[in-house]
Image: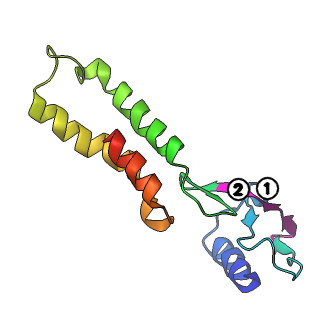
Amino acid sequence: MKLMLKTVEEFSRRHRYDINPSKSSCIRVNPKSPYPSPDFILEGSRIPLDTSTAHLGVYRNTKCKVNTKDKIELGRRTAYSLMGAGFNGKNGLKQSVKARLWSTFVVPRMLYALEVLPYSQADLKALEAFQ
């Protein structure tokens, strides 16, 4: 990990961009390990160990579990944002257009990053019930 941080520092210097160490954090995946966690240093400052963090909109925690309720809420909010464009009711858009909007906007936003997180059968059932 320390070698990776050194590579990041060198690459950022070479390509002239800054990495903000205060916005960086580490998650220890196996917190019950008897070995003490090493200090990770990025550009002279220590990176704190957190229990959860977000990277590119994907929330990770030490349990590596999917928060299904948040995913369903995100899908519901995306669907509600389309209501002003005629997504609801019979006087709005055609059913084929509504189905296309659903599969183009709502489903990908709700399922974003689920391929990298482990999920259970209960999570799958909850997501299928929303769809």
Residue 17 located left or right of residue 109: right
Q: Is residue 112 visible?
A: no
Task: Give percent across and percent down for residue 52.
Answer: 70, 56
Label 2 – label 1 distance at C-alpha = 15 Å
**Crowd around label 1: few <14 · some 14–19 · many ≥20 (10 Å):** few
Quadrant housing the N terminus: bottom right
The answer to whether 48 is drawn above or below residue 98 in the figure is below
Residue 127 located left or right of residue 45: left
Quadrant housing the C terminus: top left
101 or 89: which is nearer to us?
89
Tell me the number on the disc at residue 52: 2
Which is more N-terminal, label 1 or label 2?
Answer: 1
Q: Amino acid at mark 1?
A: Ser
Tell me the number on the disc at residue 88: none
Task: Give percent across and percent down for residue 130.
Answer: 35, 40
Q: Based on the displayed image, in which of its 4 quarters is residue 11 positioned?
A: bottom right
48 or 79: which is nearer to us?
79
